[in-house]
Image (spheres, rainbow, N blue to C red):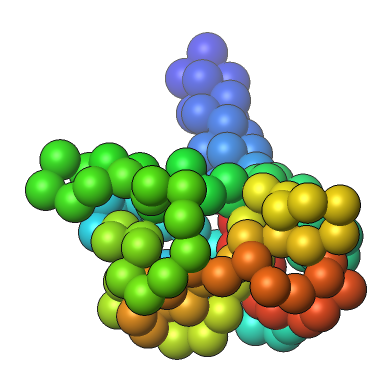
Amino acid sequence: MKKILFLTCTCLFFASAAMAACEAGTEITGKNGHVYCKSNNTMNWWSAATWCEAQGRHLASMEEMCPDTGSNNAWDGSTGSGKCANLNGVGSGEVLSSLAYGNSNFFYLNLSNGSVYNDHTRDFPRCAFCY
């Protein structure tokens, strides 16, 4: 009986670890303590969504990337410098969000300064950013 319980617990541990992988990516911890997964390669918006799903995650929304953390305000819906306090200064590069802007653009942000942008089409490559 102990062996069955041990094997069950071991399987559950590895199954849960596999569900939230970050293969071919880098884990980034936000100021809220959440661990995100950033792809090591750039890709278009559709490929980024697929890549996140392969990691057992999803392409992060702006609300998931920039939540209200108590000491930091949530994203206010606008673009500009320092708009995402949760991810300001936690890494480098520009990362995609799941939030579309208009018919063909998307919101993305710069991890080094927390700036939010929406001026490129979904085909313009950026790193995937998974929640």
In front here: 52 or 114? 114
Q: Residue at x 52, y 85 (%)?
A: 93
The part of the image, by quadrant, that contains residue 50 is: bottom right
Left or right side of 29 for 94: right
Q: Residue furthest left?
A: 71
Left or right side of 120 for 9: left
Q: Is residue 129 above or below residue 71?
A: below
Left or right side of 74 for 37: right
The part of the image, by quadrant, that contains residue 42 is: bottom right
From the top left corner, tell me how far across and down residue 35 is, in percent: 41, 56
Q: Is residue 97 above or below residue 88?
A: above
Q: Residue at x 81, y 79 (%)?
A: 124
Q: Residue at x 58, y 31 (%)?
A: 12
From the top left corner, tell me how far across and down residue 62 is, in percent: 52, 49
Q: Residue at x 63, y 61 (%)?
A: 107
Decide if residue 128 is in sight here: yes
Decide if residue 91 is in sight here: no
Q: Residue furthest top?
A: 1
